Image: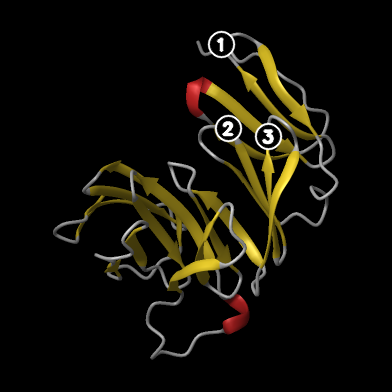
Amino acid sequence: MIEIQEYFNAGSKITQLQKLDNNLIAFNTKLHGITIFSHEKHTTKINFTNKYLNFETTALCFSSNSKLLAFANKTIIYVIHTSTNELINTIHTDDDIELITFDLYSNYIITGSKDGRVMQYKHNDNSPLARLCSFPYDRTKPFKKQQNFVSVFASYKNKLAVSGYGGAIFIIDLYSQANKDVIAHEKNHITALCFLNENTLISGDINGTIQILNIKEKKYTKK
């Protein structure tokens, strides 16, 4: 029988939960800010609030090394050094940001907007590096702009996989921005992505279908 025990009571709605390096867990709450803790040692490493982190926050993520926190209040990205709570960068954008992540090496910030744009930034620079892709992939067909979105990110080493409106999956090299693959076989809204290895990507969609994608051959296997 599986035993479930209450480990931590944050006192308000948990809006973000993420595993970091060294088996640390980070979470954000609606009213009580950020906590980073070790579940193995039962100790809290960092606990802080920030005046910019509030009810206007639309997206949030931690770097995997736990040193940085990035969050968006609609069109503005704030980058915080977690150990000092110091604001190290503010990035003003043209997009309402609904999704944000760091790459696995904590060099870049990737954002997804409600207009379907995926942008790449350096965490310590104010200007965008590139627009990585936009949704929907097929713009020859009519679509409702007000319903556009970027739904999910997944990372493996230097690779980023992203899906959004229309169900296409872009696979992009974040460092060279070359070898961009587009998988547009399925049209369903993809809600989850996970790399199994460099050449295998698993997707889950809104209808409950899980598919395994061979990236090299661009072949799906349904489960």
Q: In the drawing, does residue 86 fall left or right of residue 3?
A: right
**Neighbour class for label 2 at 10 Å: few (<14), some, many (≥20)?**
many
The amino acid marked with disc number 2 is Ser
- Whichever of labels 3 and 1 marks the residue nearer the N terminus, that label is 1
The label number, if any, that marks residue 117 in the structure image: none
Name the residue tied to disc 3: 82
State the residue position of label 2. 66
* Element type where label 1 sits in the image: loop
Q: Which residue is mark 1?
A: 40
**Dots 3, 2 in contact, CB < 8 A:** yes
- In percent of width and height, residue 131 lies at 47, 71
**Nearer-N-terminus badge (3/2):** 2
Q: Position of residue 5 (x, y in %)?
A: 65, 13
Closer-to-camera residue (145/159): 159
Q: Amino acid at mark 3?
A: Thr
Q: Is residue 44 visible?
A: yes
| Residue occupying image coordinates x 39% and y 47% | 155
- The residue under the point 77% across, 38% down is 13
Residue 197 at x, y percent in the picture: 25, 41
